[in-house]
Image (spheres, rainbow, N blue to C red):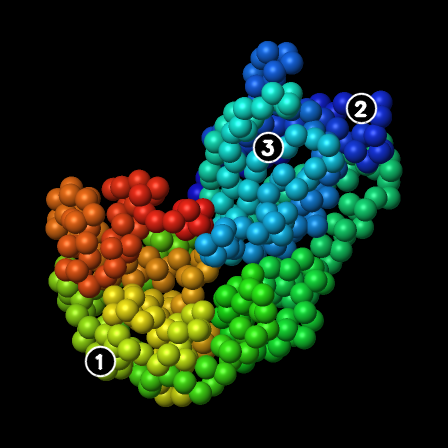
Amino acid sequence: MTSAFSILPTPWIVPREGPAETKNTTAWMRIVVGDRIVTRVDDRWSQSARDQVVLSAYPLALWFASSWWRLLWEPAPVFALGPSPAWRMAHETAAVGHGFVWPRLRFVSDGETVEISSWASPHSESEPIRYLENVRAVLPVKQVEGVIEQFQALVLRRLQVTGPRVSDLGALWDEVQVERANPEKAAWRRIEARLGYDPDEAPEALVGEIRTFGEAVGQSSSEEIATVCGGRPDPGEVFSRILDSGRSDGVRGKFPALPTLRVEERQPPWQRGRQLAAQVRKALSLGEDIVTNETIANLLGVSSKYVKDDRPDKSFKSLPMGLAIREANSQIRVILRKRHPEARRFEAARLFADGLVAPESERWLPATDANTARQKVQRSFAAEFLAPISALGDRLQGDFSEEGIEDAAVAFGVSPLLVRSHLANNGLISPEAVESPDRRFAG
């Protein structure tokens, strides 16, 4: 991933009015994302286009500091109504305010990468400038962290030179640095962010319970489960329900022994999932054959009846995730929450994929609707394993009609939605043709 991201306030200019922090850090700002200049604007007053706009760096730096943990660790929401106002305040630069017209930047993390998007401004007679560029770039979390750190340092140096030397930004950014340097505190902040809370706003008892739970079942798994609980009216109740089910429910199974499988960790999640699916198909000598229920059941060591059961235990329906739990002697306990046979096949394949890639220290293997990198690997694996894109293309022969997609879905034992998503992810149909707006937003 080589996409660029930069925030450059230069040259500095000093307006006559305004608070000292804002006034002394006002500049001609240039923001670049990918190969586009986000700050390219149409200036209605001067009747010209330019690549920089007058903004104050201080409020943007203050927003980065206050949103740090959620910006970099809270994934996109999965609910049908889309992002809540609270989520948007922590992820979109429209929240920066302070009287400036900001570009419509949005930061969405999956825990490994950050998707940075921006949209052109709508036409408005009341605004003096209109942002012109539509932008989307996906960058590693570390790269985004580095750019923000450089920007913060630049703004703080400017305040040291021009004053005020003591500011809310300085105090808040110092606090963020202390938290980042402390593994325990950083883990606490990540749980808060996954739950959808600003620092110190989450129920302390719940965060503590999830942290303790993570020590027993794996930190990554606990963060995945925290993400599932986040954004709900009572996240504590959801977490308790997950714990109760994991302690008492499920079907006994066992992961099979397979040859060593290797994936390139630096690749995006969807590529890792596809690569893993191809290796598993090769290990099982499947070629491009249809994957039967018996094959899927064998991957989890359960009965094929359990995989295709269209009348599962109703108590599982209310669970927000499927789950496999590693136990002693390579045994596992499996809980499939989906009710329809096609969805259960997909969920079973996801759990198997997580068993392949998650370290042994991660005892709970959740399959959720969250937009984290771990869940993306699972979904990519299951799609390519159940319906290899080459075999899918051969069957469809360019017929992407509803009837053609439904026929292919029946043949491969998957849902029409999976077929459309798989085709879109491989560039064969438009993403807009896939499904509802909330899923399109989630990428």
Of the two numbered discs 3 and 1 on the same chain, state the one appearing first in sequence: 3
Residue 220 visible, this angle: no
Q: Residues within 10 Å of mark 2 (few under 14, many from 20)?
A: some
Instruction: Compute the Cα span from label 3 to label 2.
Output: 21 Å
Location of residue 436 with respect to 315 vertically, above or below: above
Distance from disc 1 to disc 2, alpha carbons, whole Å, reads: 72 Å
Which residue is label 2 attached to?
14
In this rendering, the answer to whether 340 lies above or below 130 is below
Residue at the disc numbered 3: 103
Q: What element carries label 3?
A: loop
Residue type at numbered disc 1: Lys
In front of the other: label 3 or label 2?
A: 3
> In the rendered image, which quarter contains the N terminus?
top left
As helix, strand or loop, the secondary structure at mark 1 comes to helix
The residue carrying mark 1 is 305
What percent of the width, then of the height, locates residue 65?
70, 48
Residue type pointed to by label 2: Val
In this orientation, which residue lies closer to the viewer: 77 or 395?
77
Viewer-proximal residue among 7 and 295:
295
- Percent coordinates x, y for residue 361 in the rendering: 47, 76
At x 50%, y 66%, the residue is 228
Q: Is residue 439 above or below residue 200?
A: above
Q: Are marks 3 and 2 in contact (CB under 8 Å)?
A: no
Q: Which of marks 1 and 2 is nearer the N terminus?
A: 2
One can see residue 168 in this view = yes
The alpha-carbon separation of the residues under discs 3 and 1 comes to 54 Å
Residue at horizontal 38%, vertical 49%?
436
Q: Which amino acid does label 3 sit on?
A: Pro
**Regarding mark 2 in the picture, which secondary structure is present there?**
loop
428 sits left or right of 235 in the view: left
Residue drawn where x is 83% and y is 30% of the image: 18
